[in-house]
Amino acid sequence: MSGRGRLAFCAALATIAAACALLPLVDPATWLLQAALLVAVQTGVGAAARRVPLPRPVTTLLQLLVSLLLLTVVFARESAPGGFVPTPDVFQHFGALLTQGTQDVSRFAIPAPVTDGIRLMLVGGVLVIGLLVDTVAVTFRSAAPAGLPLLALYSVAAGLSQGGARWLWFLCAAGGYLLLLLAEGRERLSQWGRMFADKSRPGSAPYQPGAVGGPAVAPVRTGRRIGALALGISLVVPALLPSLSGGLLDGAGGNGGRRGEGGGGTVSAVNPLVALQDSLNQPENRTALTYKTNVEDTQELYMRIVALDKFDGSAWKPSERRIGEIPDPMPTPAGLAPDVRTTKIRSTVQASDWYAQDWLPMPYPADRVRINGKWRFEPEGRTLVGYQGQNTRGARYDVESLLVRPTSDQLRNAPAPPPDLKREYTEVPDSLPDVVDATARKVTSGAKDNYDRAVMLQEWFTEKGGFSYDTQVQAGSGTAAIAKFLETKEGFCIHFSFAMASMARTLGIPARVAVGFTPGTARGDGKMEVGLQDAHAWPELYFEGVGWTRFEPTPTRGTTPSYAQPDSPDADQNPAERLPDRGENASPTPSPSRSATCTAEEKRADPGCGAAAPGSGSGQGGDGPPVGTIAAITAAALVVLGVPLLPMLLRVRKRSRRLRPRAPDDPEAAVAGVLDAWQELIDTGWDHGVVPEDSATPRKAAERLARIGELKPDAAEAARRLALAVEQVLYAPEPRVSTGLAEDVLRVRGGLREAAPRGIRLRALLLPPSTARLLWSASRRLAALRARWRGAWRLRFAK
């Protein structure tokens, strides 16, 4: 492998090594193999273009074109003619994938599932970094600055990653960069062939570049300095970048949002606001969960994920809590008295393969959970949380839970809660505007107890307050956002639940916010299907003797529990109707409409319109076509592009080899250089219509070339100088080698192009006749090879 080839290989290796820092961010890691394959093809194209050689900008543009073709084959072949030709539709598809990837990044936690959008961002990003590194380090021969794109790749990955093995990825990235510097230094020094003295030390011995112990020359010193600076920055920058917190509704596992290993540890805070809003605004209701239960009335079967019990003024989030082994059965729910009617229900839940997040969705309160994997129990919120990378992706689990059905009298006559619980769950930040407390007291004026206050708050949000449901409202969960929501009266479930919980706390009612999914939609096979658009948040208020109790302040979303409707009979006397199966026509219910064809005007008029449209499938795109398919299509694309250009490329390569500089102190090489320059002159004339005559002397050939090619005086004089140089080499007793012959050849070539018609110029560029010499040479070699094989076979059989 040549020095430039080794440098290109090291540049590709450094890019892949730096890309390894992205591995903790997503799961699975198969995207890296795909990225490595595409970077290898990109590097090979650059190496081939430099061997021709093509001009540097052309080399980079050719690599960019091939990279675009590869991305088209992998990500948009259905939209591309022939499966690889980029068109406006392809770029539109790329834009849609990048938009999806951006949304997925904001929704998923670490490690996120490799959706099509995230995969395009990863593979495309690595390919862009690979092109930058190859261009800077190999095409323009400056490896030290190539560390900056590698640094950007590593720093972004390290800043987002929260894994404990971050040092390992740093070593990979640093090792790849140092290998690139070493290869570049060796490639530079290998071109220096003369001994010279080190002028920095008087009387020092001659120094051979590349010798051990020798002084560092300027390029090497510069590389060392830039390398040390880049590596130093790579250690500092990740510490300054903000870490990506764990998602909630659709984030992935890892250690985002929790600490500790084994059976202990803690679970800490995350903010679900962005994830929930993005889920509600998804154009497709992708299926996250399917479940089957033994209860006919599923309207109360909310899939609760986690409770947000801490309000610090900027956001509602879960407190940091201790986690431990999952008890079997779980302890009795806090505050639940034996005289409250409960029904035990059993559910079997299946999470989709793309749906990956830390907390386990399940009905509340769960009594038993049977699930494989590394899950731990957080007793305060009665949630299960994964650790050591455990998440819900493809999980199947069985849950036994209680359907708690208190009566309105039991809630109205609930005794005071424990002091510690009331103190913790009625705490509000000092920054909470006075309007929240004042509005709460105004709405609940005349109430006799906390139950009446809770119901009056719920009815004010759903019916009497003039609120409207809108998922496009700017997100916000702090105290200012709550005050603004009470003023504008527009928002979605996050705003309604945060506002009601805050107002309940100002009234002395313990409150928190639960996040999860509404029960979903019934399918014809007896199962329920829960999609992203079923994501929801609701307040839970504490009543001693009943425990944490769900209320529903969000209009057009979810269902209001029977105990929260004081004018309705108990739930067991008025069982709710079952949810309609898919395809059934049902009368309007409090649950959101399933129409998937709502116009923008209808959606503004009825925010629930289309809110739970069925997903067209729960699976995500795969990891792309097989490697063999990619390789085959890439090879076909290169053949289609390369075959028409092959004569031109071969001719350019031949010209470059003939006119390359020769060592002035090597007589044989100098003589060969003169003869090569003369042969290039003859072939250049042939390409431009001056067919060579083998019997002509050098002077006659030069005169003939000047006459037929209509050369101007300066170009004709350059041709005569070349003829004289050839005569000196061939016929003089002591050959004298002239200089500047390559410039003379190029001067004659320019004169021929200037005088030739356009058709001749195009033929000389695209289909030069002199490439026939390559066919003749190949034919001679093939004939010699055949003769050698015949001789070998004769000798073998003669024995």
Image (cartoon, rainbow, N blue to C red):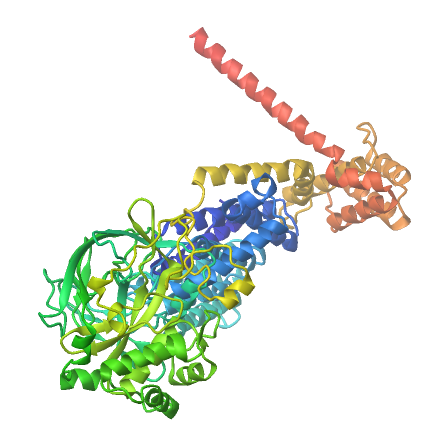
- Residue 584 visible: yes
Q: Position of residue 482 (x, y in %)?
A: 40, 82
**Quarter of the rendering containing residue 322:** bottom left
Q: Position of residue 110 (x, y in %)?
A: 34, 63
Q: 165 or 268: nearer the eye? A: 268
Disc tally is: 0
Left or right? Give the position of 68 relative to 313.
right
Q: 224 or 694: nearer the eye? A: 224
Q: 430 or 133: nearer the eye? A: 430
Left or right? Give the position of 428 relative to 11.
left
Left or right? Give the position of 58 relative to 392.
right
In what quadrant of the picture does the C terminus appear? top left
Q: Residue at x 82, y 27 (%)?
A: 695
Left or right? Give the position of 400 relative to 662.
left
Q: Position of residue 438 (x, y in %)?
A: 36, 91
- Residue 131 visible: no
Q: Residue at x 62, y 37 (%)?
A: 640
Q: Residue at x 50, y 36 (%)?
A: 632
| Outermost residue, top side | 798
**Quarter of the rendering containing residue 759:** top right
Q: Position of residue 20 (x, y in %)?
A: 38, 57
Using the image, determine if residue 500 lies above or below residue 105.
below
**Quarter of the rendering containing residue 413:** bottom left
Q: Residue at x 23, y 80 (%)?
A: 451
Using the image, determine if residue 265 lies above or below residue 15.
below
